[in-house]
Image (cartoon, rainbow, N blue to C red):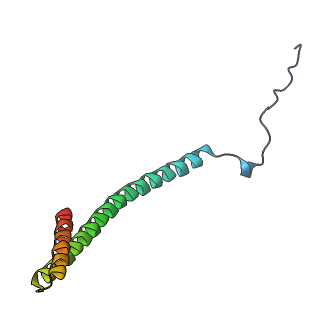
Amino acid sequence: MGQQRAPKQDLRPRVAPCLTYDSDMARGWESKSVEEQQSSADLTASGAVLDAQKRFGVERAKRERQKQELELQRERILSSRTSSPVRRAALEAALADIESRIALLA
């Protein structure tokens, strides 16, 4: 019966019970957060694809409108009649410019 051992000291810091870290609960919340982040990323990626398709459609419609405007201008120039050589030269230059811009859009 000789020696009595000193009781082991608990070296962990003392914290109020409400402030302790509950690893089981935290793990559950973390996995839900990860799941939400992944689904959010999926939605963002699909949204980016839709935005790109929408942007492409808008750009295509814009090019079509520009082409229609140029074709109307071309028709107006072709239907113009003039006896002035200066006016005729200006119309021919405008027609050449319009046709080159139509070719760029096509």
Q: Quadrant of residue 77?
A: bottom left
Left or right of residue 59, residue 34 in this image = right
For the point 18% across and 65% down, the residue is 100
Quadrant, the N terminus? top right
Quadrant, the C terminus? bottom left
Q: Measured along the vertical axis of the image, is residue 69 above or below residue 82? A: above
Front residue of 14/90: it is 90
Q: Position of residue 90 (x, y in %)?
A: 20, 77
For the point 26% across and 71% down, the residue is 62
Q: Position of residue 69 (x, y in %)?
A: 21, 78
Q: Position of residue 26 (x, y in %)?
A: 59, 48
Left or right of residue 1, residue 51 in this image = left
Q: Quadrant of residue 75?
A: bottom left
Q: Position of residue 15 (x, y in %)?
A: 78, 45
For the point 38% across and 55% down, the residue is 42
Q: Residue furthest front?
A: 85
Q: Residue furthest top?
A: 2
For the point 24% across and 67% down, the residue is 60
Tell how many labels: 0
Front residue of 89/35: it is 89
